[in-house]
Image (tube, grey):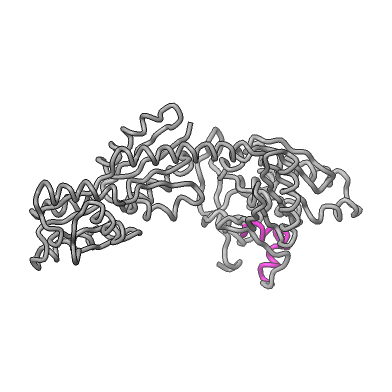
Amino acid sequence: MIKVGIVGPKDSVDAMVAVGREFSDHILLTSFIYQGVEQVPTYVAENDLETDIWFFSGVAPYSMAKAHIGKKKAFYPQVNSSVLTKVLLELVYRDGLSLDRVSFDTISEAHFRETLEELGLHCENPYLKPYKEFRKRAELVAYHTRLIQEGKVDACVTGTLFVTEELQRQGISVYRMGFTRFIFREIFKQILQEGETLHFKRSQIAVQLIEVSDMEKLVNEPTNAYELRRLDLKLQELVLDYTESISGSFVAVGNSKFIIFSTRGSYEDNPDFHPTILLKKIKLLTHSHANMGIGFGVTALSAERNAQLALGHAKNHKDSVILVDHDGSIEGPLRQPNSISYEYWTQDKEISESLKKAGVSITTFNKIISVQKALGQKYISASMIAEWMGMTPRNARRILSDLAEHNIIEQIGEETPTNRGRPRKIYRVLPSPSS
């Protein structure tokens, strides 16, 4: 089933849904009725993940929403000659009005002239306010009322419900250009075709290649074999958690490479755990840079080839994700709004001395600052540190307690646990030990 979001004023949505029921075997409709077109961005932003394709009642709601729909397909009917014909017939043949005494919005001059020619009508200097993007409703109302007040027109034609209602409230003769069932039906046919393409894309194979750049150095360094093994297990656990979130499977290739297999649909349906977040967690855990190449393809072979190509491009950047689509197009580096970056040193001697007394490394402290910034919060807790830095909650609590004891961070409160247990302490990183 194709999940289609229908957006518009009530009368338009009712007409669109009535036609959409003819396609109920393949399309699942969800209606979003607005009182004002300014509500559209909120509707779209809150429901975009549950919608495959958007169908807007006209150019106004589409213009308001297009910045929020990303790469998703969106359809809307456009005012053209066929839509104008019905109104012109009512104006001229039913009500006997002169087109020179009527103001129009929405319709382009080309469509207006073409329709007049086909109907054998004439208008020397029409009052037109065409537009392809959203215009403020008050602007359209002012355009029509000004012409009425100046005595230049006797009636108005609009493609907007609000303008229609406002002009009627002022006692002005107004005609609304409405879309026919035929136009809605043709758009639903286009939606069906797009749905088939969407289904084809979602069923493609997705291969993700991860490479941790400095892991081989750790393997070759003389170190505790148990600690190295623990690090490897924690790294695999991070990859496993991500793989589970996209319903995939993964294979470890040595100590520093992983191959993840899933479908494109599973990958695209997982916005809460973006690949860049995985790379940041890997960096925090291993102190190493990591890159990912994502490839889509009709077959596993073509997807893996694209992933290899993507990884090659990703290596030109540190900690980056590059995507190569089934058609060979390249996208990236893919990034999240927040990024985690940290240093292995500090210029603040006072903090450095306090960290030595607390028994916490400068790197660990900088990571804690980075995690707090990435989460977009003014506080941090042991559970957050444990999750992002790949350590046990007990170890995270000890580190935060030591930092607070030496006035490097301060405890600012407690949060209620989601299950049984004592309230969890929350902390804030101070600008300096003296704060």
Q: As rendered, which of 393 and 128 lies closer to the eye?
A: 128
Q: As rendered, which of 102 and 119 lies closer to the eye?
A: 119
Q: Name the spot of residue 14 as percent of width and height, x first.
A: 28, 36
Q: As rendered, which of 415 and 335 lies closer to the eye?
A: 335
Q: As rendered, which of 358 and 332 lies closer to the eye?
A: 332
Residue 201, by quadrant, is top right
Residue found at x 70% / y 57%: 319
Residue found at x 17% / y 50%: 175
- Which quadrant holds the C terminus? bottom right
Q: Name the spot of residue 254 as percent of width and height, x first.
A: 85, 44
- Relative to residue 241, is residue 181 drawn left or right? left
Q: Name the spot of residue 370 as percent of width and height, x first.
A: 62, 59
Q: Is residue 360 visible?
A: no
Marks counted in the figure total 0
Q: Is residue 19 visible?
A: yes
Q: Name the spot of residue 5 as percent of width and height, x first.
A: 40, 40
421 relative to 335, above or below: above
- Magenta: main secondary structure equals helix
Residue found at x 25% / y 45%: 178
User: Does the stretch in magenta take in 354?
Assistant: yes
In the image, which residues are magenta?
Answer: 349-370
